[in-house]
Amino acid sequence: MKRAWPSLAFALAALALWLWLWPRSDERPRLISSVREPASNVSPSGSTPASPPDSVDSEETDLNLAVDLNAAGKTIRDDLKTLDGVLQVWQTNFLHTGNPVGTNAEITAALTGHNSLHVAFISPKNPAINREGELCDRWGTPFFFHQLSGTKMEIHSAGPDRKRGTADDTTWTP
């Protein structure tokens, strides 16, 4: 029986550590908001002037780092610059030492709060995210993320023809 105690103690310690580190079901991604000037004084419906709320609850506020993504009056270069900015904030905050990696859907999931710290850099409700959970350009085509290094990510848009590798593609290289 004395030989079983170390194994049993190790198993119980491992179980306790696992339970302590396992995300709780009630734990929602924390949303980080940035300070921005309103783009206009018109509400999203276009009918009445929008006024900022007196107080903001960070648990109920969408992240504003990509609020202008695919916005009217902006260009695809603006969109790519916005995404590059989100990636820069990812790298410089919350112990992330490089870019999120994987497919578009995996990168989008990480940026919307499915990361080790449960911090959302882009709102999961951002209209640029399609049903498959991918960030899309203004023509509805998923962006292509190409990892150049641990800290540099090239971002590609297929352009208006929605086909990668054609003359109307736009690429952002940091």
Image (cartoon, rainbow, N blue to C red):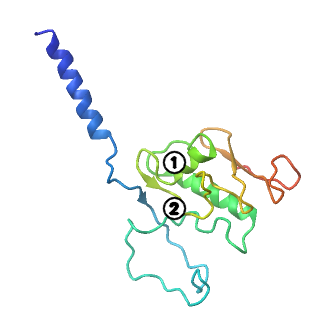
Quarter of the image for the N terminus: give it. top left
| First in sequence: mark 1 vs mark 2 | 1
> Which element carries disc 1, helix, strand or loop?
helix
**Residue 61 percent coordinates (x, y):** 44, 69
Image position of 98 with respect to 76: above or below:
above
Q: Which residue is mark 1?
A: 110
**Residue 125 percent coordinates (x, y):** 53, 63
Q: Residue at x 58, y 40 (%)?
A: 101
Q: Which residue is mark 2?
A: 123
Type of amino acid at the residue the image marks with label 1: Ala
| Disc 2 crowd, CA 10 A, few/some/many (<14, 14-19, 20+) | many
**Residue 75 percent coordinates (x, y):** 75, 67
Question: Can residue 91 be seen in the rendering of this structure?
Answer: no
Q: In terms of depth relative to the viewer, which is nearer, 16 or 155? A: 16
Whether residue 35 sits left or right of residue 84 in the image: it is: left
Q: Residue at x 63, y 46 (%)?
A: 104
Q: Quadrant of residue 26?
A: bottom left
> Which element carries disc 2, helix, strand or loop?
loop
Q: In terms of depth relative to the viewer, which is nearer, 114 or 33? A: 114
